[in-house]
Amino acid sequence: MAKCWLLLLFMAFLWPASNATPCHPDDLHALRGFAGELGGGGALLRAAWSGASCCGWEGVGCDSTSGRVTVLRLPWRGLAGHIPGASLASLVWLEELFLGSNYFVGVFPDELFGLVRLRKLSLASNELAGELSSRLGELTHLTLLDLSANRFFGPLPDVFGDLTSLEHLAMHSNGFSGFLPPSLSSLSSLRELNLRNNSMSGPIARVSFSDMPLLASLDFSTNSLTGWLPTSLAGCGELKSLNLANNILVGTIPSWIGEFDNLWYLNLSNNSFVGEVPKSLLRLTGLAATGRSLGMVFTNMPSFVNYERRALDEQPNTITGTNNTVRSGRNNTMSENDNIVMSGDSNTVSGSFNTLVCGDNNVLTGDHHVVSRSNHIVTNSYNKVSGCTNNVSGSHHTVSGSNNAVSGSNNTVSGSNHVVSGSNKIVTDD
C-alpha cells in the first residue's frame, strides 16, 4: 500500500509538467523563424529553444489558457543582426518585448507597429538607427517605451497624444533633434520622461506638465532647450528627480521648486540662470549640493543649481569629498573642497574653497574659505572672514567685523577692536 501511495505522489509531481500550457503552432513557427535569423548569440538561443513546448523556453511567456505567446524577454544575450520584424509580427498576442542590451542594427522594424497588444517595448542599448515613424502612434496600449542608447536621429514624431497610457518614456542618448513634440503634454499617466543627451532645441515650454500629476522623474539634460523654467512644472508634486542641466535655460530659479517635498535630486547646472538660489530650497531638508559652476558662490549662482539628497541622519557627521552641504547641525568634520556649511556650530573644516554661511565655534584649515559669524579659528591663507571674535592666522586674509585676533602678513583688516600683529594693512580701525 505504501508503494502505491509513493507512486501516486510521484505521478502528482509529473502531472503539471505533462499538462503544461501547449504552445500555439503559429507562435512556435514564429519563434523558430525569429531565432533562425539571429547572429551572435542566436546560435546559443537556437540550442536552448529545443522541442515544441515553446511556452517553457527561456525568455518566453504564454497565456495560460490559449497558449499564445505574450512575453518575449531576451536582454543581454549577445543577439546580433537586424531585428527579425516579420517573425515577431506573427506573435499577434505579444504584450511585452524586451530586446535591450544586445547588438541589433538597422532601423526600427515597421512590422512591430502591427503588434497592437504591446504594452511594454524595450529596444534600449543596441545600435539601431534611422528616424522614428509616425506609426509609433499605432501602439496605443504602450505603458513603457524605452529606445534609449541607440543611434536614432531626426525629430520625435508628434504622436504621443495617441499613447496616453504611457507611464515610462525613455529615449535618451540618441541623436534626436528638433523641437519637443507638444503632444508630450497629453501623457497624463506618465511617471518617467527621459530625453537627456540628444540634440533637442527650442522652448522647453512647448511641453506643458500641467496634466502630469504622477510625474516622478524628468530628465531633459544635455540638449539645447531654451526659455524659462515652465510654471506648469509647479503642479508636479510627485517629482523625485529633476535634471535640466546643460541647456540654454534663462531667467531666475523659481521659488516653487522648494515645494517639491519628495525631491531627492535637482540639477539645473550649466544654464544661463541669473539671481540667487531661492531660500525656499532650504525646505528640502537633506538635499545636499553636489556641484558648482566655476567661479560662482553659493549666495549668487547665475549658472548653477545642482543638489542631491544625502542622508545625514545622525550627528556628528564625518564628510569627505567635494561639493557637500551641511544645512544644520553641530560637530561635523568636513574635508576636501567646495563644501558648504549653511548653519551649525563647532564644525571642523579643512581643504579649500569651502563656505561657512553662518554658525559659531568652527575650526577651518586650508585656504580660500569664506567664513562668517563668530568664534571661528581660521588658519592658512586667502580666506575671507567676517563676524566677531575670530582667531585668524596666516596670510592674505580679508577680515571684517569686530574683536578679531589677526596675525601673519598681508591681511586686510576692517572693523573695530581687532588685535592685529604682523605686516597687515589696516583699512579702518574705529
Image: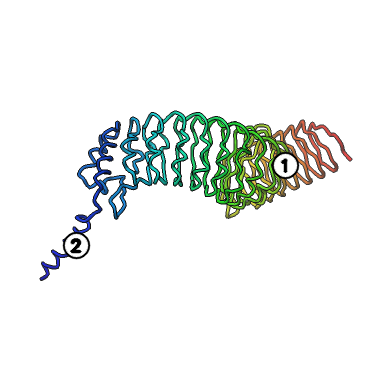
Badge 1 crowding class, 10 Å Cα cut-off, few under 14, some 14 to 19, many 20 or more, is many
Residue lying at 77% horizontally and 33% vertically, measured from the top left: 411
- Kind of residue indicated by mark 2: Ala
Color scheme of the displayed model:
rainbow
Q: Is residue 158 left or right of residue 99?
A: right
Q: Which mark is residue 12?
A: 2
Q: Is residue 47 left or right of residue 225?
A: left
Q: Residue at x 35, y 30 (%)?
A: 82
Q: Nearer the viewer, residue 282 or 223?
A: 223
Q: Earlier in the sequence, mark 1 or mark 2?
A: 2
Q: Quadrant of the N terminus?
A: bottom left
Instruction: Using the image as rendered, state which of residue 270 and residue 190 is in the foreground.
Output: 190
Name the mark nearer the viewer: 1 or 2.
Answer: 2
Residue 124: % across, % down: 42, 37
Q: Amino acid at mark 1?
A: Val
- Depth check, front residue: 156 or 330: 156
Residue 266 place in picture, x, y as percent: 60, 43
Query: What residue is shown at x 24% (from left), y 45% (from top)?
Result: 25
User: SS of the residue at dot 1?
Assistant: strand
For the C terminus, the quadrant is top right
Q: Position of residue 130 (x, y in %)?
A: 44, 28
Residue lying farthest to the right in this orientation: 430
Q: Secondary structure at mark 2?
A: helix
As measured in the structure, the alpha-carbon distance from the residue carrying label 1 to the one carrying label 2 is 77 Å
Residue for badge 1: 371
Above or below, comparing residue 236 to residue 172 in the picture: below
Q: Is residue 288 visible?
A: yes
Residues packed near mark 2 inside 10 Å, few (<14), some (14 to 19) or many (20 plus): few
Q: Is residue 154 above or below residue 400?
A: above
Residue 4 left/right relative to 392:
left
